[in-house]
Amino acid sequence: MTRIAPTVLQMDAEGPDTALPAVPDLLHDRNVQFWALNLAGFLGWGTSTIASGIYWGLDPAYNLAVLTGIATGLLLTGLLRELCQGVWSTQLWKRLLVMVTASYLVALLWQVSKNVALVHFYAPHFDPDEMKYESWPSYARGTLSSFYIILCWTGLYVGIKYYRMLGEERARALRAINSAREAQLRMLRYQLNPHFLFNTLNAISTLILEQETRQANGMVTRLSSFLRHSLDSDPMQKVTLAQEVKALRLYLEIEQVRFEERLTFEVAITPEAERGLIPSLLLQPLVENAIKYAVARSEDGGTIRLKARVDGDHLEIEVSDDGPGPPPDFRLDRDTRGVGLRNTADRLQQVFGDDQVLEIERAEPTGARVRIRVPYRTGEDVAS
């Protein structure tokens, strides 16, 4: 019996309520990030200003004026952020004009608020003649220094916004590349299935016509197992070489019904190589080519050999046969007519880039030999 763990709901004293956002989610929220950085910036400004007042021996009432400057600075830059967001999609020159003008106006209001707070909290503790504000325009004294601070704030805001946009664009580009890469790999794999399926169904049809129903039924069962494995295998995922050989034997069991004793398959793989990861169903088209050009064309059939070993930090795989082999001047990029070798080369390029090798050569005394060299990785390497 399968037991289902109960779901725990968080409830307050008044009844059910929605769960609070997790801390990691809050840390990735843009508003939280903005206000955290903004608060840190103004607290830094306030701390340095208060430290300067302590150094010069100013009355503690001066700190109240600084705290007022922190509060009004946070409020005004919050409004400035909304304005910057509103004009972000406009032309560049308009955007710059509005941002610079708005920065000056914010700096003016910020400086006035600081001067008003200075007069209200600090003036009674200081010489009135040194802090005389005869009219409202006089409260704008010191706007230039505030404008410099707010302009730096605006530049930092624009820089962070552009950096985030660049990161999002890069992420979208990577997602598009991965989607295209995945689609291409699936397309390459599905190109192989119709050819193999046609040959297998043709063989089943022949067995039925010859009233070999038991063999035909067995071939249908093997075909079902192989197709199930093929469709369940994700071309983007890697499997161990041992798993790949197991899938390959499913395919060869089907072909064994067609060729019977004419087909021989030999495997020589080191235990270390068995743990190496390769793209799923990578070897099936190579073996299919060997059957097509070596076993099927010979009355006596032939032998297909699979070898694999680890050489340093690379996995070397070799698939060979004893058929007639390729012509002496054979070139993979020029003379390959079928899709098998081309698809294998394309898949290796897609998965491993330039850190892979696919070669085909004449074997001695006869036959063809396909060599594959890819980086040696195991499941432990991927997990770490």
Image (cartoon, rainbow, N blue to C red):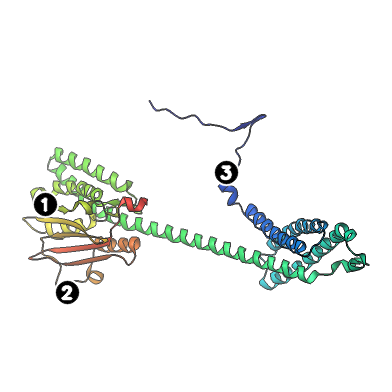
Of residue 160 and residue 74, the one placed in the foreground of this image is 74
Compare marks 3 and 1 and give the one earlier in the sequence: 3
Q: How far separated are the C-alphas under marks 1 and 2?
A: 28 Å
Q: Amino acid at mark 3?
A: Ala
Q: Amino acid at mark 2?
A: Asp
* Mark 2 closeness class: few <14, some 14–19, many ≥20 residues within 10 Å: few
Of residue 240 and residue 251, the one placed in the foreground of this image is 240
Of residue 209 and residue 136, the one placed in the foreground of this image is 136
Q: Which residue is mark 2?
A: 329
Compare marks 2 and 3 and give the one earlier in the sequence: 3
**Residue located at (59% from left, 33% from top):** 10
Helix or strand or loop: what does disc 1 sit on? strand
Give the answer, above or below, for where 79 lies relative to 214: below
Provide residue 198's location: percent of width, then percent of height. Answer: 23, 51
Provide residue 162's location: percent of width, then percent of height. Answer: 60, 65
Which mark, by number, is residue 22?
Answer: 3
Provide residue 69's location: percent of width, then percent of height. Answer: 78, 59
Helix or strand or loop: what does disc 3 sit on? loop
Front: mark 2 or 3: 3
Is residue 73 left or right of 295 when viewed as pictured?
right
Where residue 229 sits, quadrant-wise, is top left
Q: Amino acid at mark 1?
A: Leu
Give the answer, above or below, for where 60 lies relative to 335: above
Compare marks 1 and 2 and give the one earlier in the sequence: 1
**Residue located at (73% from left, 70% from top):** 148
Q: How many marks?
A: 3
Helix or strand or loop: what does disc 2 sit on? loop
Provide residue 357's location: percent of width, then percent of height. Answer: 26, 66
Which mark, by number, is residue 296?
Answer: none
Q: Which residue is mark 1?
A: 263
